[in-house]
């Protein structure tokens, strides 16, 4: 494997970082701890620690916005939701023990109403011959 392979989708040569060292007031560290040993209650250990507290803080921006990546991920998400819905529907209607009940609940019968009546001018144009159709269209 070559060392110069780059598997990132961004140009890593533009990444910048820096280190700064600052003194923080009252950052000296002192810890005092007494440890009582369970095996021998008569003995104990005292830890008196001194040192400097180091705090690391990361600031800056990580990542970039890419519209193409957003669109690809949105389309994939919608496709996965559609596929999951189809899979659940197939399992529900054909595989699960109460499939007859699920099918009845999923499919609803709707009464078909009579077709609405058309306006008289359209009916007259259809039955009145070509001369009447031309008169209505002009």
Image: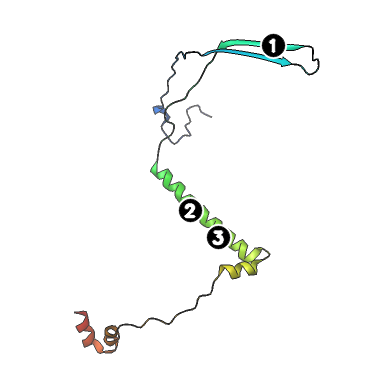
- Locate the C terminus and report the quarter of the image it occupies: bottom left
Q: Badges 1 and 3: C-beta atoms under 8 Å apart?
A: no
103 is higher (above) or lower (below) than 41: below
Q: Secondary structure at mark 3?
A: helix
Image coords of residue 1 (percent x, y): 54, 29
Residue 46 is marked as: 1
Distance in Å between CA atoms under marks 1 and 2: 61 Å
Residue depicted at x 42% and y 47%: 71
Q: Nearer the viewer, residue 75 or 29?
A: 29
Pointer 2: what residue? 78
Distance in Å between CA atoms under marks 1 and 3: 66 Å
Residue ranking furthest to the bottom: 128
Q: Quadrant of residue 39?
A: top right
Residue 86 is marked as: 3
What number of labels is visible?
3
Q: Quadrant of residue 31?
A: top right
Mark 3 or mark 2: which comes first in sequence? Answer: 2
Mark 1 or mark 3: which comes first in sequence? Answer: 1
88 is higher (above) or lower (below) than 109: above
Residue ranking furthest to the right: 39
Q: Secondary structure at mark 2?
A: helix
Image coords of residue 67 (percent x, y): 39, 43
Residue depicted at x 21% and y 87%: 131
Q: Residues within 10 Å of mark 2 (few under 14, many from 20)?
A: few
């Amino acid at each position: 494997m070559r060392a110069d392979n780059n598997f990132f989708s961004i140009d890593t040569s533009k990444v910048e970082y820096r280190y700064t060292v600052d003194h923080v007031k009252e950052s000296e560290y002192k810890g005092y701890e007494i440890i009582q040993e369970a095996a021998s209650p008569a003995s104990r250990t005292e830890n008196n620690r001194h040192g400097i507290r180091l705090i690391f803080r990361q600031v800056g921006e990580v990542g970039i916005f890419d519209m193409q990546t957003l669109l690809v991920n949105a389309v994939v998400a919608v496709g996965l939701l559609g596929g999951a819905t189809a899979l659940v529907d197939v399992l529900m209607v054909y595989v699960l023990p109460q499939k007859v009940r699920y099918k009845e609940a999923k499919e609803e019968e709707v009464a078909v109403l009579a077709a609405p009546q058309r306006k008289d001018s359209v009916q007259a144009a259809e039955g009145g011959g070509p001369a009447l159709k031309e008169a209505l269209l002009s």
